[in-house]
């Protein structure tokens, strides 16, 4: 009996040791220097890192960490709003926020506005929809007292912005953006930025507008310019594509 116990103990001493690489605990989600977006990215990446560490198919210290961290950073970057013009304060820059369209055999569902990820700090006070027929243009116009929040639901359009704010780093600059129902987005256009929409598709374009101030019929906050004017250095053309 004693010999058998000694034999088993000897076998255990010959078994190779398993060296599990250590991983430093992640920083607190709201520690100094960390934003909410960074916290979310870190949590997602850590979960995948632990999963691969358990499966131990890769060298977790030299290969897995940088490669999968880069993949998650790229994925998170595509989810958050793209800054289009003027990177100063939240209220003074245009933003485009993507909205995923979910589809199954019954149809589609797409989120237009959510208080959990608001593209603008102002509350929701006024909502209306408008359409643009194929080839037609709505603009130029700007607002002085409110910002626009415009969601594209159907169609394919070209949006042109002209910054008329003298104190803006993008003063008198043109920005041309294409928007489509294939990638539905909510766009924030700040006050005193002229904008125009041109329907470049073959069907009506449908928008849902949520300005930060309700429309005042007796004193509308709309300042217009003709499509062709001397102030904005941009010309709309109807040239066909290739």
Image (cartoon, rainbow, N blue to C red):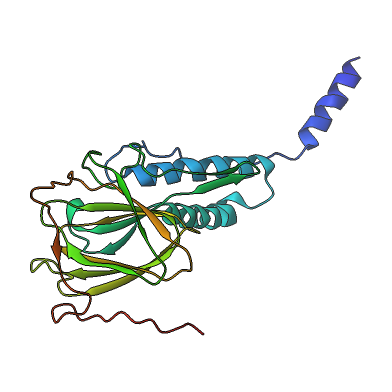
Tell me what residue is drawn at x 38 percent, y 39 percent.
27
Looking at the rendered structure, the number of numbered marks drawn on it comes to 0
Rendered position, 99 above or below 27: below
Q: Is residue 198 left or right of residue 90?
A: right
Where residue 49 sits: x, y (%)? 56, 45
Q: Quadrant of the N terminus?
A: top right
Along the line of sight, the residue nearer the viewer: 199 or 68: 199
Along the line of sight, the residue nearer the viewer: 229 or 174: 229
Along the line of sight, the residue nearer the viewer: 41 or 127: 127
Rendered position, 60 above or below 162: above
Q: Quadrant of residue 194?
A: bottom left
Q: Is residue 63 something that shows in the picture?
A: yes
Tell me what residue is drawn at x 56 percent, y 51 percent.
61
Q: Is residue 242 left or right of residue 119?
A: right
Q: Quadrant of residue 141?
A: bottom left
Q: Work out which residue is located at the far top of the displayed protein and give it.
A: 1
Along the line of sight, the residue nearer the viewer: 87 or 235: 235
Q: Is residue 21 something that shows in the picture?
A: no
Where residue 145 sits: x, y (%)? 11, 52
Tell me what residue is drawn at x 8 percent, y 50 percent.
219
Q: Is residue 236 left or right of residue 163?
A: right
Where residue 240 sits: x, y (%)? 46, 83
Tell me what residue is drawn at x 31 percent, y 43 percent.
118
Q: Quadrant of residue 185?
A: bottom left
């Amino acid at each position: 009996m004693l010999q058998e116990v000694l034999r088993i103990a000897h076998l255990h001493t010959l078994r190779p040791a398993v060296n599990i690489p250590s991983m430093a605990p992640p920083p607190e989600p709201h520690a100094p220097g960390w934003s909410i977006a960074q916290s979310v990215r870190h949590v997602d990446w850590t979960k995948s890192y632990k999963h691969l560490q358990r499966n131990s198919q890769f060298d977790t210290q030299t290969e897995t960490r940088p490669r999968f961290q880069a993949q998650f950073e790229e994925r998170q970057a595509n989810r958050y709003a793209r800054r289009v013009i003027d990177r100063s304060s939240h209220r003074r820059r245009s933003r485009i926020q993507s909205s995923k369209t979910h589809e199954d055999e019954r149809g589609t569902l797409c989120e237009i506005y959510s208080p959990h990820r608001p593209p603008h700090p102002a509350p929701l006070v006024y909502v209306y929809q408008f359409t643009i027929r194929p080839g037609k243009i709505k603009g130029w116009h700007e607002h002085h007292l409110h910002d626009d929040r415009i969601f594209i639901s159907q169609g394919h359009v070209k949006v042109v912005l002209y910054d008329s704010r003298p104190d803006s780093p993008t003063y008198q600059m043109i920005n041309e953006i294409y928007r489509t129902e294939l990638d539905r987005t909510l766009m924030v256009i700040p006050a005193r930025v002229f904008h125009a929409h041109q329907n470049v598709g073959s069907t009506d374009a449908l928008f849902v507008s949520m300005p930060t101030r309700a429309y005042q019929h007796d004193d509308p906050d709309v300042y217009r310019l003709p499509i062709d004017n001397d102030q904005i250095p941009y010309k709309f053309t109807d040239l066909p594509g290739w």
